[in-house]
Image (spheres, rainbow, N blue to C red):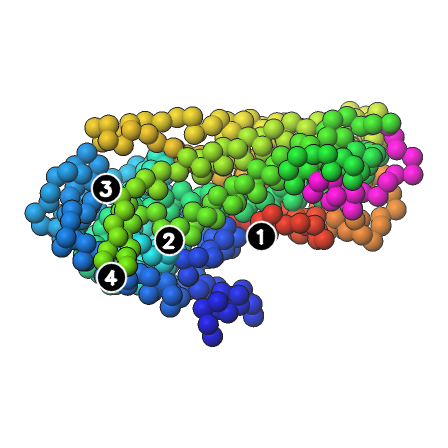
Amino acid sequence: MTEAKERAARHAGPVLETPSLLVDGRSLTCGDVARLAQAPLQVRLAPGALRRVEASHRAAVTALDRRPVYGRSTGVGANRDAAVGHAAEHAVALLRSHATSAGELRSPQRVRAMLLVRLNQLAAGGSGISPHAVHALAAMIDADALPPVRELSGIGTGDLTALATTALGLLGEIPLTRSLPPVRLGVHDALPFLSSNAATLADAALAADRLHILARAALAVSALTVIAVAGTVEAFAPAVGERLPGRGGADVAATLRRLCPPAPVPARLQDPYAVRCLPQVHGCVLDALAGLGAVTQAHLNTAEENPLILAGDGGDPDVVHHGLSHLPAVALACDTAAIAVAQSVPVLLRRLSMLTDPGVTGLPPFLGDGRPGASGIMALEFVAASALAVLRSAAAPASLGTVAISRGTEDDASFASRAAVQLLDAAGAYAVALSCELVAAVRALRLRALPVPDVGWGAVLRACGALSADAADRDLTGDLAVAERLLPELARLATAGEPVLLPVADPVAV
């Protein structure tokens, strides 16, 4: 089978107990990262990827005999002009010094994602790393032998600490979650192993994929609310979508038209903004996530090692020192996505408030069981508002910060690493807020006892059958947990027949 056919078929066939992936350095997606990070996986390096690795390594060996090469024959950072006497010893010392870290250990899912991203970047070619080291990293992934990566390490200019720790794990100097035979890493392996933002990009990919699922699920959840409050669907007319910038607003309007057939008698001439402006508000979320996915996916499949070492014409090495490991585009995309999600939740809270109001729904206050003073879903507003507080904190732009280090030679930081972590936090809080609206909307529809259609919002409501129908005052914590587990299925229902901006996959625990 050709490499192109293998890429096309890599998700086909029966689901294996251990998922596998052909790593080609060209086609890794955010959905791949999220899906494959959930459990141990097996990887295979595509033949074309191996050829690129071998060609770059040969070029690196030749280049080192001809000219100074950063990090191989010289120090790093402010030591860039310092020639090193014993390159092999310097390489190991570089790994040891850069493994310094602090903070909580990252989850296995995030570490698996980082290793997969790094392997794919190396498969793109250009690092000069030895094929031996690439195969060792693939063996680490296959064995699910995870290094202890801590939270505080990168500033958006290279995840040096996380990757140095990984390399020392291969050397046998740092314990892994599973034992591996130690390997030897040479002069051409140390800096190429470090020179990447694989941990940051892994976090960004996980966040992008999960938020896409949640943003699609939000369309299904809000459709239930529209029906529960007898909203008018005029606000979702084609003429609205056609006049909105970007693709997201038209996508929202089209989805809500499909899920929400016109009510025979709308309760209001026009609804509050929380319903009427769903295409405008939530369209921004979809557009921001599309941008995030495009930027992140491009970096997943890019060799960004400094220096790039390629086999030039006639076999002469082409060495390019550069700043590709600086990630302002990823930082800005993460910040933009976090802000877009955060600005959408106040209107979610307003819809939740509408569902508690008898003047809007014609149902008992707070959707209680009708007993005087029943609290019903009152506490959901508190929980959703608390989630909004987390979202607002996560939306503080990390990209506005910077720092100069290494005696001023590295004089700007994108803090993409922090922006990606904040986006993971935002995804968790957003899932909670959506779960609150879903529990409330389902209860309201059941209390209204409307005829349930076979398609549209009816299909969404039937998918929520696991939610309890008990309207008595009780602890709703379990209901929220069930609702959150339902969100991927609601995302699928909302996506059917609609444009897909990112692949939908199961959510990833981070």
Residue 259 on the magenta segment: yes
Compare residues 318 and 445 and report the one nearer the observer.
318
Compare residues 35 and 26 and report the one nearer the observer.
26
Numbered circle sitting on residue 98:
3
Q: Is 402 located above or below residue 31 in the figure? A: above
Q: Is 399 located above or below residue 135 in the figure? A: above
Q: Earlier in the sequence, mark 3 or mark 1?
A: 3
State the image coordinates of residue 132 (x, y, percent, origin top left).
25, 63
Numbered circle sitting on residue 503:
1
What amino acid is labelled 2 in the image?
Answer: Gln
State the image coordinates of residue 316 (x, y, percent, origin top left).
23, 58
Q: Earlier in the sequence, mark 3 or mark 4?
A: 3
Compare residues 75 and 461 and report the one nearer the observer.
75
Cα–Cα span, label 2 and label 3 = 20 Å
Give SS at disc 3: helix
The nearer-to-camera label among 2 and 3 is 2
Cα–Cα span, label 1 and label 2 = 21 Å
The quadrant in which residue 447 appears is top right
* Residue neighbourhood size for the residue with mark 1, other residues' Cα within 10 Å, grouped as few (<14), some (14–19), many (≥20): few
Q: Magenta stretch?
A: 250-268
The nearer-to-camera label among 1 and 4 is 4
The nearer-to-camera label among 3 and 1 is 1
Q: Which residue is labeled 2 in the image?
A: 121
Cα–Cα span, label 3 and label 4 = 33 Å
Image point 83% across, 27% down: which residue? 270
What amino acid is labelled 4 in the image?
Answer: Gly
The quadrant in which residue 125 appears is bottom left
Find out whether the residues at labels 1 and 4 contact each other: C-beta distance under 8 Å.
Answer: no
Q: Which residue is labeled 4 in the image?
A: 315
